[in-house]
Image (cartoon, rainbow, N blue to C red):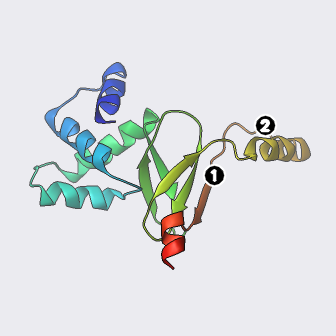
Amino acid sequence: MAEEMLDALDRAGVRLTGPRRRLAALIARREGHFTAADLVKDVGRRRLGIGRATVFRLLELLGEQGLLERIDLPDGSHAYIPCEPTHHHHLVCLECGTTTDVGDCGIEAVTREAARRSGFTIEQHRLELFGRCPNCSSAN
């Protein structure tokens, strides 16, 4: 995943600095969603000497390339998920943070009907479903 991120940034004309390469590697190793603060803490623990501004800028750049998606969590905060640059939706475990990408889920039919009823031209949508993954459900 880190190489995909770096390749996409390179194709977009973004300079591949050492800090950006190290951050891409950190992001690629993460499982589930993470916050910018999580990434900043990880950088600090590893003594990488990468500033907060660099972390936030890379998150933005990866989002622009469709390799990282920001999700809004139920508590009002937001997090990031590394993902493929294709349209999809997310299932997010509230307990362990595991995320699963899902395709259409029938939402295309819902958006078409909403557009028909409202007269809106819907240009994009996003769906995040929150609950418990199979492992966390069976543990409770």
**Is 104 placed above or below 15 here?**
below
Q: Is residue 20 visible?
A: yes
Q: Residue 13: percent from the left, percent from the top?
A: 32, 21
Within 10 angstroms of label 2, few (less than 14), some, or many (20 or more) residues?
few
- Give the residue furthest to the bottom: 140
**Is 29 placed above or below 65 here?**
below
Marks 1 and 2 in Cβ contact (< 8 Å): no
Name which residue lies at 41% across and 55% down: 32
Which residue lies under the disc numbered 2?
A: 121
Q: Secondary structure at mark 1?
A: loop
Q: Amino acid at mark 1?
A: Leu
Q: Nearer the viewer, residue 59 or 28?
A: 28
Q: Is residue 73 visible?
A: no
Q: Nearer the viewer, residue 90 or 37?
A: 90
Q: Residue 127: percent from the left, percent from the top?
A: 63, 52
Within 10 angstroms of label 1, few (less than 14), some, or many (20 or more) residues?
some
Q: Nearer the viewer, residue 119 or 4?
A: 4
Q: Quick one: label 1 or label 2, which is nearer the N terminus?
A: 2
Question: What is the C-alpha distance between the residues marked 1 and 2?
Answer: 18 Å
Q: Is residue 137 left or right of residue 28?
A: right
Q: Is residue 71 left or right of residue 3?
A: right
Name which residue lies at 36% across and 59% down: 35
Disc assigned to residue 127: 1
Q: Residue 131: percent from the left, percent from the top?
A: 58, 67
Which quarter shows the N terminus? top left
Name which residue lies at 32% across and 24% down: 7
